[in-house]
Amino acid sequence: MNEEIDIQSIGETLPLLEGLRTTRAIRRLKPDPVPLALVRKVCEAATFAPSGGNRQPWQFIALTDPERRAWIAERYRKAFDTYIRPAVEAAKDPGFPEKKRRMQRAAIHLAEHLHEAPVQLFVAGWTRRGEPQAQSLFPAIQNLLLACRAVGLGACLTTIHRAYGEEIDRYLGLPEKCPSIALIPIGWPLGKYGQPPRASIDECFHDDRFGDTSST
Ligand SMILES: Cc1cc2nc3c(=O)[nH]c(=O)nc-3n(C[C@H](O)[C@H](O)[C@H](O)COP(=O)(O)O)c2cc1C
């Protein structure tokens, strides 16, 4: 499949609003390789995001080496077992909504299979006055997720690697002033894109002042 990909044209025709309505967290990925040129393309799309003062603090590190991915995956899993798995256990309660349970199962799958994702993409960013510029990185990250959607790649924003953040950043060779903020596993999706579960706009759109919701 990879040999047939025309990097320049892939993903260029998906309507913007349709793309953003059907972008969801894809945590089940095929282990098949993804061309680095395509990863560069989605990272380039990310760079068109706004940032404070147009400082563009982002840096992207695409990890593809299997041993290095396994090293990262080990730490991700440890963080998951410490911080997320207890909540997942609680979700075994039969009263827990099925949609959330599905999400938990997918999160467990990712934690157990992260080493198989062909690309572990880290988004890092230069600090400003000693502080990370998260506000200026998340718009770029969202662009990246949308670009993955457009070209047909599966991706999911994750952050729990930060539990081992300093160790991981050293491993990636990141300068202290440029910590990683997100780890986005990328690969060809096993599942399909589609509309994610969201509350109705009626519940969060207010006409003139908070509390005045109107549906048309
Ligand atoms: C700031 C942030 C941090 C996240 N961290 C993780 C994470 O560490 N692991 C994970 O599996 N998903 C993580 N997610 C993904 C969310 O769980 C996901 O966006 C949410 O469940 C909605 O998914 P959907 O768009 O498929 O409905 C994170 C999302 C955000 C915005």
Image (cartoon, helix red, strand yellow):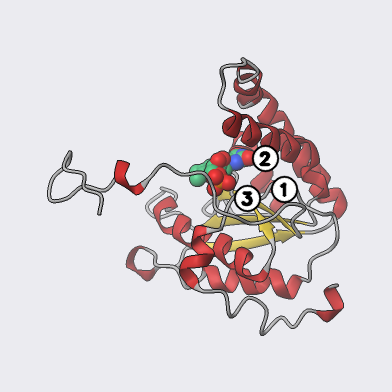
Q: Quadrant of the N terminus?
A: bottom right
> Does residue 165 show up?
no
Foreground mark, 3 or 2, reads 3
Foreground mark, 3 or 1, reads 3
* Residue found at x 74% / y 47%: 28
Which of the two residues, 71 or 26, is positioned nearer the viewer here? 26
C-alpha distance separating marks 1 and 2:
6 Å
Q: Is residue 45 left or right of residue 62?
A: left
* Residue found at x 66% / y 50%: 26
Q: Quadrant of the C terminus?
A: bottom left
Marking on residue 199 = none
Query: Type of residue at label 3?
Result: Cys
Q: As displayed, is residue 96 above or below residue 205?
A: above
Query: Type of residue at label 1?
Result: Tyr
C-alpha distance separating marks 3 and 2:
22 Å
For marks 3 and 1, the one nearer the N-term is 3
Dot 1: what SS? helix
Q: Is residue 127 left or right of residue 108?
A: left
Q: Disc 1 vs disc 2: Cβ atoms closer than 8 Å?
A: yes
For marks 3 and 2, the one nearer the N-term is 3
Disc 3: residue Cβ within 8 A of ligand 1's nearest atom: yes
Which of the two residues, 131 or 54, is positioned nearer the viewer here? 54
List the residue tagged with mark 2. 167
Q: Is residue 46 left or right of residue 34?
A: left
List the residue tagged with mark 1. 171
* Residue found at x 56% / y 63%: 144
Dot 2: what SS? helix
> Does residue 13 show up?
yes
Disc 2: residue Cβ within 8 A of ligand 1's nearest atom: no
Q: As displayed, is residue 209 above or below residue 147?
A: above
